[in-house]
Image (cartoon, rainbow, N blue to C red):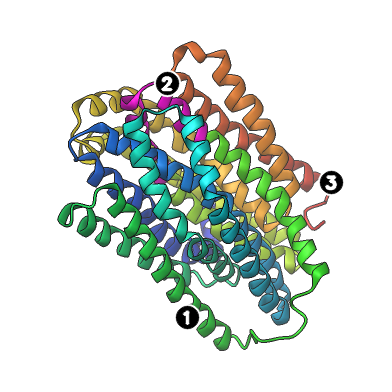
Amino acid sequence: MKQFLIHNKAHHKSLLLLATPMILSNITVPLLGIVDTAVIGHLESAHYLAGIALGSAVISLLFWLAGVLRMSTTGLVAQAYGKNDLAQLSALLKRSLLLAGAAAILLILLSPLIAQAMAFLSGANNAVLTQANTYFSIRIFSAPAALCNLVLLGWMLGVHYARGPFYLLLVTNITNIVLDIYFVVYLDWGVAGAAWASLIADYSAFIFALLLVIKLASKQQIKLILPGWLSVAKMANLLRFNSDIFIRSLILQLCFSFMTFYGARLGEITLAANAVLLNFLMLVSFALDGVAYASEAKVGQAKGQKSVKNIELWVKVSAFWGMLFGILYSVFFALFGSSIIKLLTNVPEVISTANEYLPWVVVLPVLAMSCFLFDGVFVGLTRAKNMRNSMFISAAIGFFGVFFVFINWQNHALWLAMSCFMLMRGVTLIIKYLQLKQDKQLLD
């Protein structure tokens, strides 16, 4: 290991220079959920916390399904960056923003039907549904900004401008946290205050990100106003590429949403406890995604340069740091998990229930490390079909298969299924990567 670190010192440093700003800023992303949970969790009843858990879960499902826009943008832009194709960098930005805007309008138009589906699928009581609908009906109008922000973030990552996403996420999250406390605690707006805080933060970040991208494009002599970018054929190709990642993201979010909806059927205390613990998992996912995002950019650039050697090297370097961070998070949760739960809520029943399921959260960072990392590798390789197939197998067998075998364990069955699902995603992607490497198909 020592020789690996010494001989590849420059590569480790390069990856960390790209990953560290993303890790620091991504850690603030789950702070949004943590602050929402902490602020709402200290109101007088658990149905406020359960309601915001349900409403935000639906918003997260919708917006993270749109995360396909960031992933496809990063992979394609990284490859164009490796080829030094400035015209393609400009065209990809505009096509992806157009897609994001169209998707956001569609979500707003469908929002009444989505709200009805939320009520039907969750089976939550009227008190919880009232709070969930309040949150959802406000937050859905942040879709245009939130989805375009994903594209702008992905584009900056693709051109290796890590500070841009760092600034973007900090603006979003700090604005949200400050407004959360002001609207909910001082103005006593309750769940509606949390929703308005997120909406304002999303639009503030969009304006900021747009200015950043315009400045960066000018600095790198990328002309944003070029003819020929709005090509029907090229838009169709972009849509086809996005479709596999969309299916992959849909399956992923269905698994997470199933945890929320089935938890609602187990009662509002279980739903609220799972909401607290999922903040731990989100903290892990965004931290490990910092390494994965760097891997996307580095592997994509190496593929654009047609260098198999560099692809393999960046995978090894990324795997080293991903495992290190996974172990550190497991140790941190083992030592401080109970204390964090008490910071998030003062409802005794929720604290007791969350502590019962805390051991699952302790082991998850190590189990999940490889799935986050190799998602990044396959985004950089732009092999979306392999990601889709891995996700389908892992969800069918690792999540739903395991859950229904152990369904009598109730909420423990949910956490066991999530653990197996995360592990299986990583294992299937590793097997596929080794197969591509053996068959010399990494550049295909």
In this view of the protein, which residue sits in the foreground, 155 or 131?
Answer: 131
Q: Which secondary structure, mark 1? A: helix
Residue type, mark 1 in image: Leu
User: Which residue does the image show at 28% across and 49% down from the upper left?
Assistant: 35
Q: Can residue 400 be seen in this view?
A: yes
For the residues carrying marks 3 and 2, which lies nearer the camera in this image?
2
Between discs 2 and 1, the one toward the N terminus: 1
Q: Main secondary structure of the magenta part?
A: helix
In this view of the protein, which residue sits in the foreground, 213 or 320?
Answer: 213
x, y percentage for residue 184? Answer: 22, 52
Q: Give how far apart the Cα atoms at labels 3 and 2 are.
A: 43 Å
Residue type, mark 3 in image: Asp
Instruction: Locate residue 331: give its quadrant.
Output: top left
Res 411 label: 2
Q: Name the residue under label 1.
A: 211
| Residue 99 higher or lower than 323, as above or below | below
Residue type, mark 2 in image: Asn
Q: How many labels does the image show?
A: 3
In this view of the protein, which residue sits in the foreground, 232 or 407?
Answer: 232
Res 439 label: 3
| Residue 171 higher or lower than 338, as above or below | below
Q: What stretch is highlighted in magenta?
A: 256-283
x, y percentage for residue 177? Answer: 28, 58
x, y percentage for residue 56? Answer: 41, 45
Left or right, 229 with reference to 165: right
